[in-house]
Image (cartoon, helix red, strand yellow):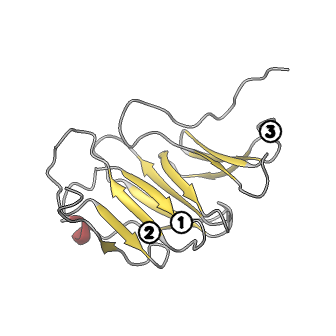
Amino acid sequence: MTRDFLFQPNSTYITGRSSDLLFDPHYYGTWYSGSGTKLYKTQDNGFTYEEIYNFGVDVAAMDLCMSDPNVIYACTFPDWWADKKIYRSMNGGSTWIEVTPPSAMLNNADKWIPYDIAVDPVNPMKVWIVRTSMYNGYPNYNGFMAYTSDNGGSTWTNISGTMLN
């Protein structure tokens, strides 16, 4: 039997704009898809979907904690020059809070640069982000590329350095 793949993840050639499929590590038929502005969940391997949340702007990079898949992080991509944001859910995507690093930590500029995100597989509050410019070498954001948080994005530490430039 074949069927259409509804609610496919956002995909594009534009760096930082594509979304992900997140698979629940405990239930092989349960996964999340960022499609358009919405986050969808299937619990039957894609036969049916439930809209979990509408961000109002395109869903981009996402990740979840393997030991606690109720903790999900999602980045958004409103448009090319708009500010990109990061959100966290502690309840499987029902509610979200913004956890984007403050503007001052991002050198007070270039908030349009998208993020990629990774969550520690054991500690759902440990997260890393990197900024992924859509231009090769522009802007020069050396020293403002990589960040980590030990408290789910409430505060961030800049871990950029010459090894990452």
Q: How far apart are marks 2 and 1 (CA)?
A: 7 Å
Tag 2 residue: 99
User: Could you tell me the amino acid type at mark 2?
Assistant: Val
Dot 3 or dot 2: first in sequence order is: 3
Secondary element type, mark 1: strand
- Label 1 environment density (alpha carbons within 10 Å; few <14, some 14–19, many ≥20): many
Dot 3 or dot 1: first in sequence order is: 3
Residue 16 occupies quadrant: top left
User: Could you tell me the amino acid type at mark 1?
Assistant: Arg
Tag 3 residue: 48
Q: Report if the CB atoms under discs 3 and 2 are less than 8 Å apart.
A: no
Query: What is the number of callouts on the image?
Result: 3
Tag 1 residue: 88
Q: Residue at x 38, y 70 (%)?
A: 148
Horizontal and vertical percent for residue 78? 40, 45
Residue 27 placement, left or right of 10: right
- Label 2 environment density (alpha carbons within 10 Å; few <14, some 14–19, many ≥20): some
Q: Report if the CB atoms under discs 2 and 1 are less than 8 Å apart.
A: yes
Secondary element type, mark 2: loop
Question: What quarter of the picture does the C terminus occupy?
Answer: bottom left
Q: How far apart are marks 3 and 2 (CA)?
A: 30 Å
Q: Residue 149 carries which label?
A: none
User: Could you tell me the amino acid type at mark 3?
Assistant: Thr
Horizontal and vertical percent for residue 39? 62, 48
Q: Outermost residue toward the front?
A: 163
